[in-house]
Image (cartoon, rainbow, N blue to C red):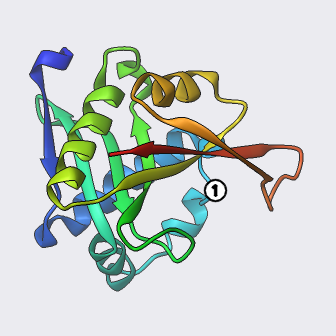
Amino acid sequence: MTRETTTITVLGAEDVARLREVRLTALRQEPSAFLSTFDEQVMWSDDDWTRELRRGTWLVAADQGDDVGLIGATSEDDIPRDDRYASYMWVHPDRRREGIGTLLLMTLIARLREGEVSSLWLWVMDDNPSALRLYEQTGFRLTGDRQPLAADPTRHEVRMIRRL
């Protein structure tokens, strides 16, 4: 399995179960990387997952039938209407440093450009140097915004932006 055999799929209305499964896998494997928890989202109903899928654009990376990555882009109230937030970014731990994160990000950016999105924003944990490096290498820049996590004020996230 290599990046060359990895495919990116844009999830459609019929892919609610796939979004749920990949997201819950990410939360199970990397609980400290996300604000949401497995225990919270495993309780979501099918309707909750359907609403989540409709809230944005979701891409899954797969290799030989195994889902190995996820990213989404959603619109939110705290950014301009023609901007999006990147969220749910995850690459399976066994597949990191293979370029899958870059592939997910660049595929998402290309898709958002087609939809005339101006900028892509994200929040990332400031104690995750690998993620910070990935985002910087794909054109994101720190905005100067930094905030503590509500669940653990000793940890902070920083906001980044990439103009499209």
Q: Quadrant of the N terminus?
A: top left
Total numbered circles: 1
**Furthest residue to the bottom?**
47
In the picture provided, is 83 more to the left or to the right than 14? right
- Residue 85 appears at what percent x and percent y? 45, 58
Task: Answer left or right for 114 relative to 132.
Answer: left
Q: Position of residue 83 (x, y in %)?
A: 39, 62
Residue at the (14%, 72%) spot, across then down = 13
Please tell me whether residue 85 is drawn above or below residue 124 in the rendered image: below
Residue under the point 81% across and 43% down: 155
Is any atom of residue 87 visible in this view? Answer: no
Q: Give the left or right position of residue 2, taking residue 53 as reference.
A: left
Instruction: Specify the quadrant of the image occupied by residue 61.
Output: top left
Residue 8 visible in the current orientation = yes
For the point 35% across and 48% down, the residue is 71
| Crowd band around label 1 with a 10 angstrom C-alpha radius: few (<14), some (14–19), many (20+) | some
Residue at 19 percent across and 14 percent down: it is 2
Which image quarter: residue 163?
A: top left
From the viewer's perspective, tell me whether residue 140 is left or right of residue 3: right
The residue closer to the viewer here, 15 or 120, is 120
**Which residue type carries mark 1?**
Leu
Q: Tell me the residue that label 1 is attached to.
A: 35
Percent position (x, y) of residue 123? 59, 49
**Dot 1: element:** loop
- Position of residue 84 measured from the top left corner of the image (x, y, whole percent): 40, 61
The residue lying toward the viewer, choosing from 66 and 32, is 32
